Amino acid sequence: MHLTKPTSTFISLTTIPMNPLNPEEFRKQGHLMIDFLADYYHQIHKYPVRSQVLPGYLQKIIPESAPCSPEPFETILQDVQNKIIPGITHWQSPNFFAYFPSSGSTAGLLGEMLSTGFNIVGFNWMSSPAATELENIVVDWVGQILRLPESFLFSGGGGGVLQGTTCEAIICTLVAARDQKLSQYGMEIIGSLVVYCSDQTHSALKKAAKIVGVNPKNIRSIKTSKASDFQLLPGPLNHAISTDLRDGLIPLYLCLTIGTTSSTAVDPVGLLSEVAKNYEIWVHVDAAYAGSACICPEFQHFLDGVENVNSFSLNAHKWFLTTLDCCCLWVKDPTALTKALSTNPEYLKNHATESNRVIDYKDWQLMLSRRFRALKLWFVLRSYGVDNLRNFIRGHVEMAKNLERLVVMDKRFEVVVPRLFSLVCFRVSPSAVGQKSGEDVNEINRKLLESMNGSGRVYMSHAVLEGVFMIRFAVGATLTNMRHVSVAWKVVQEHADALLR
Ligand SMILES: *Cc1c(COP(=O)(O)O)cnc(C)c1O
């Protein structure tokens, strides 16, 4: 072979003095970073919970282009303190009660750090056997704690996977369901497939249906009402399905929710899955937030009937002390998933002897490359133990119960829907503001929420149910204790005093 000799144009290695993975630098800067975060958690309650900056704030204080030469780590951290933190909404603040909080923990955070440190790309078994095998083990562990039927566990022929988010879990299961129907009836029926949910189902389902190619006209968002606590009921579901069958459509997928996002309503899984059974519909249960509570025996009954569904998911990054992102998805029939999502190019094959016996998680998800998410969940389970995890949940539920009592004691307010978990939905009641129209009452509550959030002392969010604007107070941040909840209620009362005067 003819090789050209290097000429004077070759790059001398001595012109690259930098080692971006120098272990001693890492140690030094790593300690600084941990100290920075520890200080942050010490002071987190002092920051305005919801960021107070205006759009475009950062552009004005950050240089227009990237630096050509290195800058010291300390300088960068200084900028984090001065320029980034003002633009942070502090989800870990004990005064964060908006949306569903994302419960951080030392074990979750450091487990995350470890997986980032290894920085493996675990698409198949061989790409890091421990990543796949630990994931098999921890999803079975969590499944056992939830008392999911054996059929969802690897030990019982099913199996679980850690996805990034619920949105991904829904897309994957919907694709699996779709492909089953297409292989049964032929590609041309795709326009006839129908997806069922309630008007309380998370918007993730609509997005998934769009991506998966379901005709937007074939999404049945079945109406719920306050009379039935915003649950999807078997009657209306059965009616919708029968109507579609009569029209020559093909029922495909039903998404049930344990703990809806607006009000934590729980669909009766047993009754609804009985209906679906008659029509060969894939049933998924989205328990993103409230699934974590079902590790406690007193909430276990919400899972009744889950043995009849096809898949079940919960977000460990919501109420299970595991940092974002970590959605646990269990399926009864893993081959339905892998049939739909497998690709098998030569360059991704495991060594021939293992290929048939191992799990390649690339075939259980949308993406190829995947993080070692099991580590952080394993750290959480081992560092705290199941008893403490249960008590963690119960603590938040108790605080929410206490808050509910405080709301009821102040006659100006009302609880809008019954509290089931740690979310309290309340509002200034119409009677407190005289004979005003529904819209006016909504406007007062909207103003109340904005004035509280604008103060920076607390952060709550809202939802609208049957035209009623309500304030959502979700207890779930790790640092929250009853004192924070009491003070937050005082904040509500003070702002209401000013507004109703
Ligand atoms: C939070 C939530 C979702 C969305 O979760 P992602 O992980 O962000 O996709 C879906 N469904 C319910 C019921 C939720 O509470």
Image (spheres, helix red, strand yellow):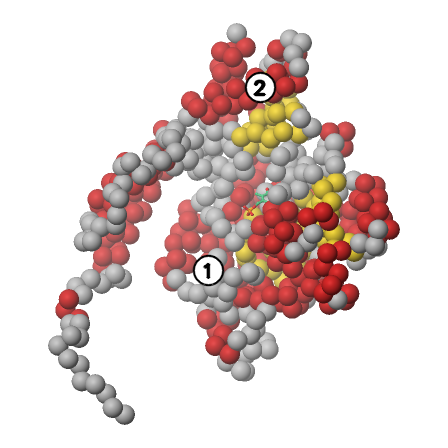
Q: Could you say which is closer to the camera, residue 105 or residue 187?
A: 187
Kind of residue at disc 1? Arg
> Along the line of sight, which residue is nearer the eye, 412 or 280?
280
Label 1 crowd (10 A; few <14 / some 14-19 / many >=20): many
Residue 29 position (above or below residue 460)? below
Specify the amino acid type for callout 2.
Glu
Task: Point out which mark residue 443 bears.
Answer: 2
- Give the residue pinned by disc 1: 371
Which residue is painted at 47% across and 20% down in the image? 451
Q: Is residue 370 above or below residue 462?
A: below
- Residue 492 lies, in percent from the top left, at 51, 19
The quadrant holding residue 319 is top right
Outermost residue on the right side: it is: 246
Percent coordinates x, y for residue 224 in the rendering: 74, 35
- Residue 293 is left or right of residue 57, and the answer is right
Spatial CA distance of label 1 from label 2 is 45 Å
Locate residue 264, reporting x and y percent.
64, 36
Q: Is residue 1 left or right of residue 233?
A: left
Residue 105 seen in this snapshot = yes
Which image quadrant is residue 408 in? top right
280 vs 429: above or below: below
